[in-house]
Image (spheres, coloured by chain):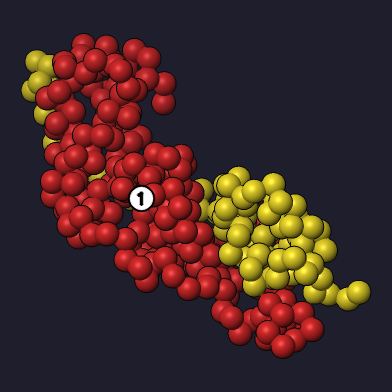
Amino acid sequence: MSLPPARDVSCQQLVELLTDYLEGVLTPDEVTAVERHLALCDGCAAYLDQFRTTIDALGSVPVQTLSDETVAGLLEAFRGLTR
Amino acid sequence: MPDEGLVELLLAGDEAAFATVVRAWSPAMLRVARAHVRSDASAEEVVQEAWVGVLRGLRLFEGRASLRTWVFRILVNTARRRGRGDAVVMAELAGPTVDPLRFRDADDQYPGGWREESTPAWWGPESRVLRAELREALSRALTELPERQRAVVELRDVHGLQALEVCELLDLTPANQRVLLHRGRARLRGILEEAAP
């Protein structure tokens, strides 16, 4: 049979299950259905790969932090407290 | 950051140790605070106030939880006092995360399957996707996510917090935490897909 395969879970349903799949909260039956679909469907396998790449990329975005002024104020408060 | 000995260092007046924890924990604290209050400036005030509360209470810290857990608890209490306490907006939880037009109709031979012309393509080596301009697009896209989605995605995927911790800090059920995480991730993937070669 040609693509798209996997009758148990459609591609449209699968894309909504991926975070639950990655978080490990699907039932064993659901995991089996998702993995069977992914093994047969190149589009969804690519989608999952993109999803993972996005998550990995998030690990390296710059983060907001306290202003230097606030940090300086806190260090001052710390000195005052332990003096 | 290992907790061991940290409290002792702080109580002994080790300023470098204090500066280190402030720098290490404040980015995630800002994100948590920002989920409770309306502006970045208020969030910064909440974090500042929380640290002052930490300094005041340090001598009373009994070490039942880790120092980090205790600091985040003080933060959440401070943020809640100042916060708006909005419930999760339903719009942040509902609807599909991928355009339904990309899938085949119900009367198709493969209902819900990708349409040929809109099937996701492999992005190729990660390095290409993670080029500077795409990382910038991702940073920008984060600021455009609905507030709760942004908070969950950043705390989980940027700051690396555990799911349970995020539920506690943001007053979310585990199910809603996952829905917000999923929707945020899916939206960001879509933005990278548009930007990808």
Q: Colour of chain A?
A: yellow
Residue B27 percent coordinates (x, y): 33, 44
The C terminus of chain B, quarter of image: bottom right
Above or below residue B27? Residue B192 is: below
Quadrant assignment, res A68: top left
Above or below residue B195? Residue A72 is: above
Residue B37 percent coordinates (x, y): 20, 55
Residue plotted at (79% across, 84% down): B109
Quadrant assignment, res A37: bottom right
Residue plotted at (27% across, 12% down): B8
Instruction: Tell me which amino acid carries mark 1.
Output: Leu
Q: Is residue B114 visible?
A: no
Residue plotted at (15% across, 23% down): B57
At label 1, counting other C-alpha atoms closer than 10 Å, the crowd grade (few under 14, some 14-19, many 20 or more) is many
Above or below residue A36? Residue A1 is: below
At mark 1, the secondary structure is loop
* Circle 1 chain: B
Residue plotted at (58% across, 47% down): A25
Residue A18 percent coordinates (x, y): 61, 58
Left or right: B90 with respect to B191?
left
The N terminus of chain B, quarter of image: top left
Q: Is residue B49 visible?
A: yes
Left or right: B181 with respect to B14?
right
Check the image and name the residue furthest to the right: A1
Q: Colour of chain B?
A: red
Q: Which residue is mark 1?
A: B172
The answer to which of B185 and A39 lies nearer the viewer is: A39
Residue B186 percent coordinates (x, y): 53, 65
Total numbered circles: 1
